[in-house]
Image (cartoon, rainbow, N blue to C red):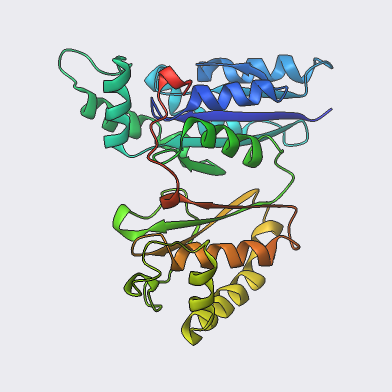
Amino acid sequence: MMLSLIVISGRSGSGKSTALNVLEDMGYYCIDNLPVSLLAPLITRLSSALTIDKVAVSIDARNIADDLVLFPATITDFDSKIVETTVIFLDAASPTLVKRFSETRRKHPLSNKVTDLREALELESSLLDAISDLAALTIDTTSLTIHELRDEISTRVARQTHEFALLFLSFAYKRGVPVDADLVFDVRCLPNPHWKLDLRSLCGLDEPVQVFLNQQSEFVEMFTDVSEYLNKWLPRFEANNRSYLTVAIGCTGGQHRSVFMCQKLFDNYQSNFTNVQVRHRELSGPANPSEKNGV
């Protein structure tokens, strides 16, 4: 029996507890804060147990620092015929993590009398490099509410890794490129509905904006070019055993052009893949997933 192993990692405050809770609800045998040195013995024991076929563990900077560097070798040593391993890395912008810690008044596990919170977060990033480099999926929780994060985990992770999961994500360049983007397309060169006073307060989900953009030859050309690129390369990503792919589309404010482009691509590819999602980062409310809300 093949054992499915999901490793959840990430910086403190990024939502690892929420992710683990979702996986537990999905029937995974879950262990929080597992020492890297105990991962191999755990897999050996569980692979011989006929009653457990799905396990999720959280491994983070609370580990012994010297053990964290052993993570890649530990994962590599697993027999791929017995264990299927997926590493999921959660992160958020440092100011967001600082805000979450401030609001919950929690102490960062690496902070002390000589290391403040910001320094602890930087140190944590370097300690977790060995794990983040192996991540099949990185989830940026900066702008996610607690409910959106739970949905993200349940749809992109817990559906299981044999299925190719494709996410179209719109964003605003003025708020930064999403850290979890695999492919990024810039549509700021397209005509902007923002300069139409009757369209400014609307978004790319509204019909008047969609009608305007569909009438712009540049928008139609961009959609065609992006689609042709994806038609060629998405099957190759899937054939290369990629389980997740995030296609990010950005414009200046993340309200009009990128939103409608993502929606059109989402509609276009639903018939090509069984697990296709769309998310509009700037149309979501300001996120603050914190410990008091379950993150």
The location of residue 286, given as percent across then percent down, is 37, 40
Q: Quadrant of residue 82?
A: top right
Task: State the residue in front, 224 or 5.
Answer: 224
> Residue at coordinates 70% horizontally, 25% vertically from top-left?
26
| The residue positioned farthest toward the left in the image shown | 114
> Residue at coordinates 55% horizontally, 76% vertically from top-left?
223
Residue 266 sits above or below residue 229 on the image? above
The N terminus lies in quadrant: top right
Instruction: Please give the count of numbered marks on the rendered protein.
Output: 0
Whether residue 185 is visible, yes or no, is: no
Q: Quadrant of residue 53?
A: top right
Whether residue 112 is visible, yes or no, is: yes
Residue 257 sits above or below residue 243 on the image? below
| The residue positioned farthest toward the bottom in the image shown | 217
The location of residue 195, given as percent across then percent down, is 32, 74
The location of residue 115, given as percent across then percent down, is 19, 20
Q: Quadrant of residue 96?
A: top left
Task: State the residue in front, 217 or 84.
Answer: 217
| Relative side of 171 to 262, left or right | left
The location of residue 148, given as percent across then percent down, is 53, 37
| The residue positioned farthest toward the front in the image shown | 198
| Relative side of 261 to 43, left or right | left
Task: State the residue in front, 228 or 104.
Answer: 104
| Relative side of 192 to 151, left or right | left
> Residue at coordinates 58% horizontally, 62% vertically from top-left?
263
Residue 62 sits above or below residue 85 on the image? above
